Amino acid sequence: MSGGAVAVLPEGLLDAGVWFRVEAAGTAAAVRRAAERLATELGMPAARIADLAIVATEAASNLVKHADEGTLLLRPVRVPNRAGVEILALDRGPGMADITRSIGDGHSTAGTLGIGLGAIVRQSSWCDLHSVPGQGTVMALQVWAGETPPQAWAAGLTRALAGEPVSGDGFAVREAEGRRQVLVCDGLGHGRLAHAATQEAVRVFADTPAAPPAAVVEALHRKLSHTRGAALAVAELDPGAGLVRYAGLGNIAGTVLNPDGSRRGMVSLPGIVGHQRRQIREYDYPLPAGGIVLMHSDGVVDRWKATDYPGLLSHSPQVIAATVLRDAGTRRDDAGVLVARVS
């Protein structure tokens, strides 16, 4: 995570994206330049790159002017044969009591023209916003060229341990022969070797033929023996049966969140994928209509409650995941969160 201007960005912005700590006014220019570069790499047309530049600048500027402890994630988003840019802006307060009024042009709490949020909504292809006074705001937005694709049913995000260049945590989403499956992985340790183990898990997950979660975890265990190993879990959402099927090894937490905010934990067994396992078992859990599957690494603690965030569970997977990472993610470890829902 960077604070202030960024002198050098990675050669090719990876799908994990780039985090910015947004504290100084100069950060907005750095975010804009990074967004323009990413959009250029993705082959977006000049007109949408210009729109993205406005959105990125306003999102970062709003954090500087109005927010405490603002951070921003910039990353690509992809659907078959197309790519766009996604921005997640997080802060810890003061929050907004009336989001509709705050989005309207002319409303400002910093003595400006008050066009920031309005410009973001107009220029974005899609935008979602959740705010709680006293706790903060999370905003997710995307900029696409052409028609906006349907929103993803699952989304996640990761953040590296402070001082590390990459995160050992990762996630993946796939639909294979009617199976909607998600993966959360935590490579053993930290740094590049942990990152390599997780990237291999993501690759194998994508290439493994459609199978129940336990069989997928078994395949991952066989294929990761040349890495340092990982904790991981695979969940399969089956809304027709009203079930989530779950299999995991190691310290990955899985939870079913009901629409009323109550929760039920899912079981991961002891082990290190690629090295140590006693057994791999698959468990079924009820998945009610409107229910959410939330999975995270041990860099995120279970001290948050959905009932503390009125209306949060009706928002997009991106906003839910970012809220959990903001408030429950630790700085002493890589952190990763994934949220999946099927309406």
Image (cartoon, rainbow, N blue to C red):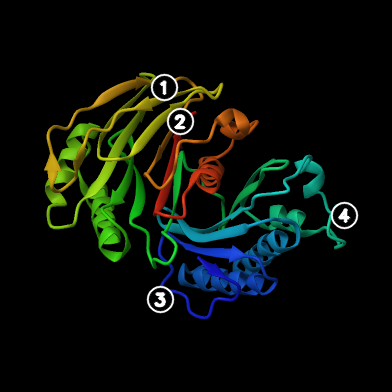
Number of the front mark, 3 or 2: 3
- Residue that appears at 44% across and 62% down: 162
Q: Earlier in the sequence, mark 4 or mark 3?
A: 3
* Residue 69 placement, left or right of 276: right
Disc 3 + disc 2, Cβ < 8 Å: no
Which residue is identified by label 3? Answer: 11
- Badge 1 element: loop
Residue 4 vertical placement versus 304 (above, below)? below
| Label 1 vs 3, first from the N-terminus | 3
Q: Determine whether, in the image, residue 236 is placed left or right of residue 127.
A: left
Q: Which residue is mark 4?
A: 106
Which amino acid is tagged 4?
Gly
Residue located 78% across and 40% down the image: 97
Please identify the residue farthest to the bottom as the structure is shown: 7
Q: Earlier in the sequence, mark 2 or mark 1?
A: 1
The image shows residue 190 at horizontal and vertical percentages of 31, 59
Residue at x-position 55% and y-position 44%: 327
* For the residues bearing labels 2 and 1, Cβ distance under 8 angstroms: yes
- Which residue position holds label 2? 342
Q: CA distance from mark 3 to mark 2?
A: 36 Å
Which kind of residue does numbered mark 3 sit on? Glu
Circles 1 and 3, Cβ within 8 Å, touching? The answer is no
Mark 3 or mark 2: name the one nearer the start of the chain: 3
Q: Residues within 10 Å of mark 1 (few under 14, many from 20)?
A: many
How far apart in space, not on screen, are marks 2 and 1 (Cα)? 10 Å
Residue, disc 1: 287
Whichever of callouts 4 and 1 sits on the residue coming sooner in the sequence is 4
Q: Which mark is residue 314?
A: none
**Picture quadrant where residue 197 is located:** bottom left
